[in-house]
Amino acid sequence: MRTTLYCISLVLSIYMLIGCFSKHENNWPQFRGTNSLGIASENATPPLELNPDKNLAWKIPLARGLSSPCIFDGRIFLTGFNPKDSALITYCINLNKGSFLWERSAFPDTLEIVHQFLGSPATPTPVTDGTLVYVYFGTYGVLCYDTKGNLLWERRLPILNAQYGSNGSPVIHDSLLIINRVERKKPSILALNKVNGKTVWQRYLDLAAGSPELMDISQSTPVIWRDQIIIHHGFELISLNLNDGNVKWIIEMVSTGNATPIIINDTLFVNGWYNVGHPSQFDSIPDFDLMIGKYDANHDKLINIQKEIPLELALFKRPEINLPLSGDTLYPLKWFAGGYDSNKDNSLEEKEWNQMKKDWFDYLLDHAVIALKLYPEVESGQPVLIWKQKDYVAEVPSLVGIRSRIYMVMNGGNLICIDSKTGSVIFKDRLKAPGSYLSSPMYANGYIYFTSYNGRITVVKPGDKLNIIAQSDLQEKISASPAAIGKFLYIRTDSALYAFKKL
């Protein structure tokens, strides 16, 4: 009897596995594909070289947006934003021909705040179950279309009050549509009935213990593991029960909640990045006597904030990002020092300076890439930390896992390869494509595709040393992550969607 039951169970498991593969074989139903892994199906054989003069199948212009391709049954779903009339646009594009099948617009009353250089009100990637398509805009709410473009329902939501707007994409699990609604006032995860848009549950999140209020943020997409939805939130990973949204566990980590975790064989990997998480990103605040001796030009034994603190003395700096000087690339010490000028004389005395230096040390926290074993059988229900790698951490792009290696790309074009079992760094090398990286890597047909914000696509053969196979340059800004179906590679730039085909 036991043998018979085992055989039946095995047959059912194989049937379910085949069904899962057949459903997603030629589809890319959400951000980074199935459960945000960034791995194409086994039958995907996209080109290695991307040359508009040789193997460009088609190119179609789009309004600017940062959403990535969502693909199902020959249709590509994307979003864009037209600033002229504040239209939030949903596109449906023929997969093979590159022609518009339909286009729909929604018009918000006001717009959410987004990053002045990199952001867009059209950042979350659509999600589909093959029958219905769901589009989320933090400045509007949720719209549900059928595949022919008929609006079935919409759910207006309060405009999101987040530092850089809405960036996490919606996901589907069974009858639920799950949305990251983390913001400054009422951060939450919202689960809607995907049939009618009504709230099934909404879980409001507390600020992680000991973290500053401005860190109540998350720009990641939720991932699903068994009966749980896991969210990378500012300074923590949090797991909620899919049925009711109740908290199952919380793991504290130093992070601004940028990257979307990946789950491989019940192990979760995520890069938790923080502005001052590594010594290379900040300057130590000098002692007061050293500042007086070097910069006190008028010899008054005070440090004038504007005149005697050099601009290049920074609390944190990111020279590898090719953006104008601002709080994202250089945060000068003088911007921070004004908060310690108690008598408002535009100068700091020794007591004020030392208090600033003391407070600054509270911000110097270690960020890391971490690996957690998700054990459902552990009585506590808490995952187990396997390793933590603190030397190299990618800021925005998520990780990609191939066999026993984890790969990630940092700003500046540094590729890091990590042993997934131990967390040890196998190698660190440059892709020869500098600048910032917002797009997450994708694996297809034995190769990893890395895309820089400058428009450089570098194809790498996985291994224990850097092996660059091909490099292409589209000479356009790229923030979205690529998708691969069959012989095609789809890349969304600032102005268009490109489809390259393997010849």
Image (cartoon, rainbow, N blue to C red):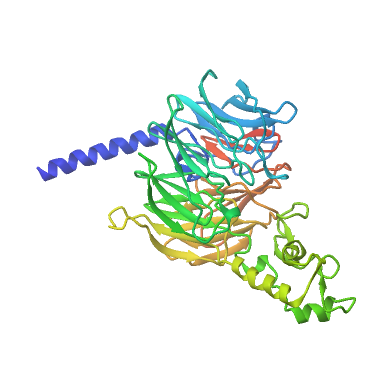
Q: Residue furthest right?
A: 298
Number of on-image labels: 0
Q: Position of residue 422 (x, y in %)?
A: 43, 66
Q: Is residue 318 left or right of residue 143?
A: right
* 228 to 55, vertically: above or below: below
Q: Position of residue 493 (x, y in %)?
A: 67, 38
Q: Position of residue 286 (x, y in %)?
A: 73, 76
Observer able to see residue 502: no
Q: Is residue 310 left or right of residue 328?
A: right
Q: In the image, what residue occupies the spot 70% across and 70% down?
A: 283
Q: In the image, what residue occupies the spot 68% across and 52% down?
A: 436
Q: For residue 223, which quarter of the picture?
A: top left
Seen from the viewer's position, the closer of residues 246 and 101 is 246
Q: In the image, what residue occupies the spot 61% across and 65% down?
A: 363
Seen from the viewer's position, the closer of residues 55 and 110 is 110
Observer able to see residue 168: yes
